[in-house]
Structure formats: C-alpha cells, structure tokens
Amino acid sequence: MESFSPDIKKLFSLIHKNEKIVAMLAPSFPVVFEYPQIVGMLKRMGFKYVAEVARGAEETNKQLLALTKLHPDRRYITNPCPTVVRIIRNKYPELFQYLSPIDSPMSATAKICNKKYPGCKKVFIGPCIMKKLEASEDRPELDILVLTYKELKIVFDIEKIRPEKRDMLAVFDIKAVPTRLYPVSGGLSQSAGIIEKFTDPEYDVVSGPELVEKTLKEFANKTELKLLDILNCNGGCIAGPGIASTDSIDRRRQKIINYWNKR
C-alpha cells in the first residue's frame, strides 16, 4: 500500500479497525457514480452511514440568507469553494472582509453528522483536492478525512467492490433534494432563491479560473454587486480535479439535473 495516498491509507485503517464511519458524499457524485448503487457499495465497503452533502448545503443557504437579511447593506462572496477562499487570502486579502462567514456544505454536513452519529469518523468524498486543505487548515476541529472520487475508485478496485443487484435497495441516511444542484455553477443561487431575492445587478454567478480572476479584480469597484456566487472550476464542481470522466461539461451538468429531477 506504499504507493497509495495517505488519505487512502487512513481510510483502510478505519475500515480494518472496524471503526464506525460515515461517508459524506458531495452532490457532484452523479457525474461518476450511479444512485443508489454508490450508497450500497459504500456500505458494503464498511461505512455505517452515508450522507448527502446536499443536506449541509441547505444549512449553508440558510446561513447565507440569514446574513443578507440581517445585514442588507453588506456585500458577500460565497465561500463553498476552498480554492476561491485561498485565492482571496493570498492574492486579494482586501476582499477577505466580504467572504461569507458561514459553514461550507462540507463543514455543515460534518456538524449534522456529529449530532446524529456521535463518535462516528467522518469521511468526505468529492471532486475537489482543495477540500483536503479546508478540512486540515480551516476546520481541523471537525476531524474530516477527505478523499476524491478518483481515490474512492482506487479503494473500490482494491476491495473488489462492484455494483450488485442488492445495492438498488440502498438509500441515503441523510438526504436533501433542492440543493442537489449545488455543484453546477449557479446551483447555490438557484437553490437559495437568490435569483428571486436579488435584482440582476445585485448578484452574479461566476465559474472558471479566468472569470474568477477578472471578477475578483473588479469586485471592490462594483458596489452594486451584493452577492457573488463563485466557483473556481469551469462549470462548477462538476469539473473538479478529483473527477475522472471523459464526459463534456454539458453532459456532466445534465447528469446532476437528471438526479435532481428524480426527487
């Protein structure tokens, strides 16, 4: 196991010690995995519970809307993307005051799991390698182990776990529906109702490194812009580096929409 990532080794250690572990599955999972098979596969691998991080995204939305209601004159840059958070910290520190001081969907889901499953080890599984830094640097007190989808596929291969007929009966232990659109650019604005609550000049939806840089450079002077819904990867988290897929961005987006439409 020497060639595997430290986080894969940590997961195997938890499994082999028969620790109680809860998987927190990011809402971009339909890009690479089928539901409900993925839930059954995770449980057969050793996870006691499987939670949709879309549930934590509901809390992120609630906290953000509460802030905009409490401070209607303030301006906010959304914080679910750890890459954007780090760009602002390192390159545009003057914008740090605008970062929404709320839980990301990952952090919010971890708190929900702590309450519902006390003592369980939490494993976030998603498309973003920067979530590893969010877990270790920004929220170490939540003790979250982070794996990418690529790493999870390696674990499945090692354990020889493939979809089985019985997996079709599996269900999420914690779930949410409206925020299943979160990984698509604009998913936060859509699910939180920002589109209805703000006028066009008051909010903007941005994704992709070039647009992120351009928008952050201009943000301070665009005083009419009250809320910036921003993700660093093109098209949103569906293009994260932890995803192995030959699908186009449009096809990935459609997979998310199809899963959301299942309700």
Image: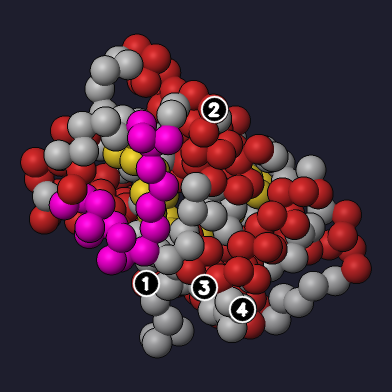
Give the left or right position of residue 83, taking residue 22 as reference: left
Q: CA distance from mark 1 to mark 3?
A: 18 Å
Image point (48%, 68%), residue name: 239
Q: CA distance from mark 2 to mark 3?
A: 32 Å
Residue bounds of the magenta highlight: 200-217
Question: Reading the chain from its start, which is encountered first: label 1 or label 3?
Answer: 1
Question: Reading the chain from its start, which is encountered first: label 4 or label 2?
Answer: 2
Residue 184 visible in the snapshot: yes
Label drawn at residue 196: 2
Instruction: Tell me the kind of residue under disc 2.
Output: Glu
Label drawn at residue 247: 4
Q: On the image, numbered disc 3 is attached to which residue?
A: 243
Image point (54%, 27%), residue name: 196
Instruction: Kindly check if marks 2 and 1 are in contact, taking CB atoms under 8 A apart as contact.
Output: no
Image point (60%, 41%), residue name: 179
* Mark 2: few/some/many CA within 10 Å (<14, 14-19, 20+): few
Residue 41 belongs to magenta span: no
Tell me the mark number nearer the camera, choosing from 4 and 2. Answer: 2
Image point (49%, 24%), residue name: 197
